[in-house]
Amino acid sequence: MKRARDIRDQLEGLLERVEIELVSNLSDYETIKKAITSGFFPHSAKLQKNGSYRTVKHPQTVHIHPSSGLSQVLPRWVIYHELVLTTKEYMRQVTELKPEWLVEIAPHYYQMKDVEDCKISLSLSLSLSLSLCY
C-alpha cells in the first residue's frame, strides 16, 4: 500500500505542476478496472468449463492463485499482472474485466473474434451487439 500511496502522490504532484484539477470518484470501480486493463491488456484470460483459465492471445492454461480473493469467485474474464509457476501456472494480482474493453482499449491487439464470449453473436452496429449465450 505504501508503494501505491507513493505513486498516487507522484501523480498528484504532476497534475499540480501542469495545472490539471484532480477529480476522484472512489466508487467508480469500472473506470479503475479499465485503467488497469489498458496497462495489462496482453495479460487477459477467459474462464474454461473445467475451472481453469485460458490466456487469450498466446493460449496457455492458467489458474488464479489460491491467495487471491477471486480464487473462489472465478469471474468469466480476468486481467492479471504476472504468472507464477509452482505446481501450476498461477495468475497473480487479478481483477475482473469486461471482454469488450479489450477491443475498445487495444484494437491494434484484439479483434472481436478474440473476445467473443458466446457461440452466436449478432452485430447490430459497431457500438452495440446482441449476444445469445448458451
Image (cartoon, rainbow, N blue to C red):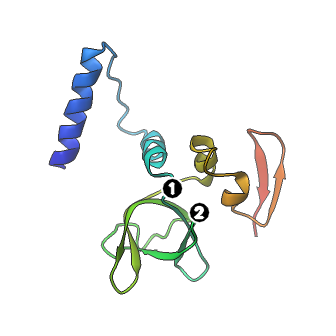
Which of 75/58 is in front?
58
Per the image, label 1 sits on a secondary structure element best described as loop
Query: Would you place residue 126 above or below residue 48 in this image?
Result: above
Mark 2 and mark 1: Cα distance apart in space: 7 Å
| In-image side of 73 versus 67 (left or right) | right
Viewport quadrant of the C terminus: bottom right
Residue drawn at (58%, 44%), measured in percent from left and top? 106
Residue drawn at (27%, 30%), measured in percent from left and top? 11
Residue drawn at (35%, 37%), measured in percent from left and top? 26
Q: How many labels does the image show?
A: 2
Q: Position of residue 109 (x, y in %)?
A: 60, 50
Query: Would you place residue 18 above or below residue 9 in this image?
Result: above
Residue type pointed to by label 1: Pro
Per the image, label 2 sits on a secondary structure element best described as loop
Residue ID for mark 1: 42
Query: Residue 57: which numbered mark, if any?
Result: 2
Asked whether the beta carbons under mark 2 and mark 1 sit within 8 Å of each other, the answer is yes
